[in-house]
Amino acid sequence: MRHGKYPFVIGFLAAPVTIYVVFVIAPYAQAFYMALTNWRGLSPGQFIGLENFTRLFQDDVFWKALQHHGILLLALPLVTIIIALFLAFMLNVGGGSKQGIMTGVWGSKFYRVVFFLPQVLAVAILGVLFQSVYRPDGSGMINSLVTKIGLEPIGFLINPDLALWSIIAVLVWQAVGFYVVLFSAGMSNIPKDIYEAAMLDGATRMSMFFRVTLPLLWDTLQVAWVYLGIAAFDAFAIVQTLTVDQGGPDGSTTVIGMEIYRNAFTYSKYGYASAMGVALFFLTITFAALSLRVSRRESVEM
Amino acid sequence: MSVDLEKPPVKSAAPSPEKTRREVNVLAGFGHLFLAVWALLIIAPLIWTFLASFKTNEEIFGDAWTMPGALRLDNWARAWSEAHVGQYFLNSVFVVGLSTAGTMLLGAMAAYVLARYSFWGNRAIYYLFVSGLAFPVFLALVPLFFVVRNLGLLNSYVGLVLVYIAYSLPFTVFFLAAFFKSLPNSVAEAAVMDGASHTRLFFQVMMPMARSGLISITIFNVIGQWNQYLLPLALLQGEGAEEKWVLTQGIANISTSAGFDADWGGLFAALTMAILPMIVIYAIFQRQIQSGLTSGAVK
């Protein structure tokens, strides 16, 4: 190309690359080193090798948090994807065939707008909102109805057995809309004549869903699974704003993000917090790599 | 759901139309119900919050599903001024306005150069940006805190805006690079023939041509930065930090410090004030938001 290319390229890249390297790359690089020190913020930290990690693996709180991620990792994608798939199917092909074109049920446009709405609400705000939803007496949105039909109020957030599931419900509530839209986009890429052919062959809606929609949507489902899995490792904000004692009651809802935050900004154990961060990093990467591998499958040629 | 599974459809013989219709009706009925219930589950808490913003403490701690006794607008007034929601709101507008503008300018510049110019190190820089998508923010949190502190930018808007820009760049560059790559060459060539400089070509030809992509990713960044919680929590602390807090941080703080004797009506008024602008923006741009987010996700 013409002269002046390099000054231009450098001029355009200098600011974004500098900001990115200083505030993103450098901290990530430091985190890996910091995890090998016992730095507590005031005195200079000493290099202690893998000691943080051996302590980490003996830390009950860490294991508890890890166990919660395990539950999140299974429940969040599974429930979200099933609900979103069903809703997306209704919105796109549930209305049957009109002049040979598959349509969604009546009101599809309205539903599509409403379902996505939680996606634009801040997680911190959801935390406050759902405190009112879950309040353990008749002034809670759910328990008001529960007591009206004569049942005992449910201690959603104060019962250690229920608290984590209550959190998962909020995450599903928020996530479904995005996946409805994602799956809708995937479904609209499926050629209409496949459905028509299936219709003519007398396929029921059920078998159309399982034999046509699902196989052709496999790639999109895989993306959804990875996204939701990564979200399951990142449930910090909702835990901090919604749960009793930030991760309680009695540690029953704590997640690694919560423990990183607590160790760093409450106890000033920066080295230890970074070790947790590194562990979280490897968990996330491993999960993403594994799930992409396991779910790899011959995609259907169209 | 065991909705009338019948026998598996026989390939050649079409089932009687009556049977198909019945199957359609049952499933459609169940589907309609489920759609309506899910919509209600989303709208109900929002309406409740809106109603609670007019309630007194006694009403809020009474039966949840009763109407407020009167339209108490003073809850809103108190939340706006005494609980500083007005302040937090303006802080958020200020920070997000600056950082979205910065993200778009810097992100578009980087994406454009990376997408349309070949030079040594191009791929390396591109992957450096894109790799940022894979890292959990938590990992960087502690060192980031010290980077910002050592630069003397802790508890300052400059620091927060720069950090927002930095963390929005990976997705912005990733998305826009694909977009710039897809733009036709002919227009660019014509402009070069007419003697346009590189910079002029970018601002007067390429940017306008990439408008739809720029709008999608701008909305995405506005929502993401407006809803950001972790970064301001970690970076806006120290003396006088309260005055700089952004909306999500302020709301979370009001709620954690609120006991039974606190101003609950004011809290819900504050909450409504935080939710309403997002609903309005969403209602206006919902088409672009949905298509923008999914096209970014599928690519």
Image (cartoon, rainbow, N blue to C red):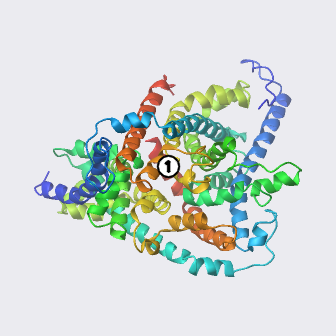
Q: Is residue A262 above or below residue A205?
A: below
Q: Please give left or right for residue A250 compared with residue A300 in the image.
A: right
Instruction: Please give the residue where the numbered disc 1 appears in the rendered image.
Output: A258
Quarter the N terminus of chain B occupies? top right
Q: Position of residue B138 (x, y in %)?
A: 41, 48
Give the residue at x 28% y 36%. A49
Give the residue at x 17% y 46%. B119
Give the residue at x 41% y 66%. B237
Residue toward you, A257 or A108: A257
Amino acid bearing label 1:
Met
Q: Please give left or right for residue A214 compared with residue B188 in the image.
A: right
Q: Position of residue A77 (x, y in %)?
A: 58, 37
Name the outermost residue toward the right.
A150
Residue toward you, A87 or A286: A286
Name the outermost residue toward the left.
A3
Quarter the C terminus of chain B occupies? top left
Q: Position of residue B7 (x, y in %)?
A: 79, 20
Q: Residues within 10 Å of mark 1 (few under 14, many from 20)?
A: many
Give the residue at x 61% y 76%. B79
- Count the labels in the image: 1
Q: Is residue A62 above or below residue B205?
A: above
Observer able to see residue B134: no
